Image (cartoon, rainbow, N blue to C red):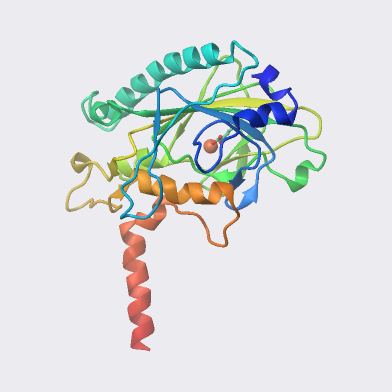
């Protein structure tokens, strides 16, 4: 990983990802329309990548793309593939434990993960001359079900504490992973689990590396609260949404700066809809 990122930009750009090629090298990502101080290399643990071509509901096209492996270092592909195979086992185990913690059978989530989306990102955050003016990754929540994150000993990841909105530093612990709950698990569990907001700060001296493994159901999944966790007293807090279309909408903002906030699961919250409707009705009444 270090060897790959240490190469000149022209070399890395030979495996560049763009609006057609879903994975590869990328050094111009935006989080919430602000450019991140990082470069990344993305790959998936599958032979092919299926992604909705666009966010348009009528567009049923799901083109295939493939991993792009660099020539150098030659061992990168093998190491990445082996890493993904091993971490995946942990992801399945964690989903079983989460199901049990919700009072459900351990296998409750297995049908969602028969053909999962497993994508891995190699993150490189170079030292930044003005660390107070930039973020390695702007504040965001992960969109998948679970993220299993490996980080080196430099530090920089911060999580937003809900009680007071303060950013709390996650100290690196050697040989330990950080597990992030993602948006999908928040919706499935009807808010029992909450997707955590996080960001990455940078520093002026040390570069930092991290490797998140993102675990999600396939793109065609309709994400909605599990029936067993909702009833009349505790109704579903979200409307169902199509994962592929959600991600395609989000992806638009990765490549360009948009004027609008990008799509969030809160847009599917039933309560928000009710509030919006209330607002609209009261405006009409005036
Ligand atoms: O580098 C990190 O610690 C976290 C990166 C991250 O949040 C992401 O890539 O989604
Ligand atoms: Fe993240």
- Residue 243: where, in percent of width, then height? 35, 44
- Residue 98 appears in the picture as rendered: yes
> Which image quarter: residue 123?
top right
In the image, 98 versus 59, the foreground residue is 59
Q: Residue at x 17, y 53 (%)?
A: 232
286 relative position to 260: left or right: left
**Up/down of 71 relative to 100, above or below:** above
164 relative position to 205: left or right: left
**Up/down of 212 relative to 254, above or below:** above
- The image quadrant where one finds the N terminus is top right
> Which image quarter: residue 113?
top left
- Residue 108: where, in percent of width, then height? 23, 29
- Residue 226: where, in percent of width, then height? 23, 41
- The image quadrant where one finds the C terminus is bottom left
- Residue 189 appears in the picture as rendered: no
In the image, 106 versus 163, the foreground residue is 106
């Amino acid at each position: 990983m270090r060897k790959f990122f240490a190469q000149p930009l022209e070399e890395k750009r030979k495996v560049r990802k763009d609006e057609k090629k879903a994975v590869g090298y990328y050094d111009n990502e935006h989080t919430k329309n602000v450019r991140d101080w990082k470069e990344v290399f993305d790959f998936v643990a599958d032979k092919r990548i299926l992604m909705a071509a666009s966010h348009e509901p009528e567009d049923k096209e799901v083109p295939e793309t493939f991993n792009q492996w660099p020539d150098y270092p030659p061992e990168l592909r093998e190491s990445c593939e082996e890493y993904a195979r091993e971490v995946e086992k942990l992801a399945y185990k964690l989903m079983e434990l989460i199901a049990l913690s919700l009072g459900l059978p351990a296998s409750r989530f297995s049908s969602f993960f028969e053909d999962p989306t497993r994508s891995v990102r190699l993150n490189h955050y170079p030292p930044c001359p003005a660390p107070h003016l930039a973020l390695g990754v702007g504040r965001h929540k992960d969109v998948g079900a679970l993220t299993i994150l490996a980080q080196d000993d430099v530090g920089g990841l911060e999580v937003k504490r809900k009680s007071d909105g303060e950013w709390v530093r996650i100290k690196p612990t050697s040989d330990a992973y950080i597990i992030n709950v993602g948006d999908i698990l928040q919706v499935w569990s009807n808010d029992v689990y909450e997707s955590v907001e996080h960001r990455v700060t940078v520093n002026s001296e040390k570069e930092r590396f991290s490797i998140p493994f993102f675990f999600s159901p396939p793109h065609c999944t309709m994400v909605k609260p599990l029936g067993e966790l909702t009833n009349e007293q505790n109704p579903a807090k979200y409307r169902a949404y199509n994962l592929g279309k959600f991600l395609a909408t989000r992806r638009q903002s990765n490549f360009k700066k948009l004027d609008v906030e990008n799509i969030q699961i809160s847009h599917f919250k039933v309560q928000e809809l009710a509030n919006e409707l209330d607002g609209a009705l009261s405006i009409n009444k005036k």
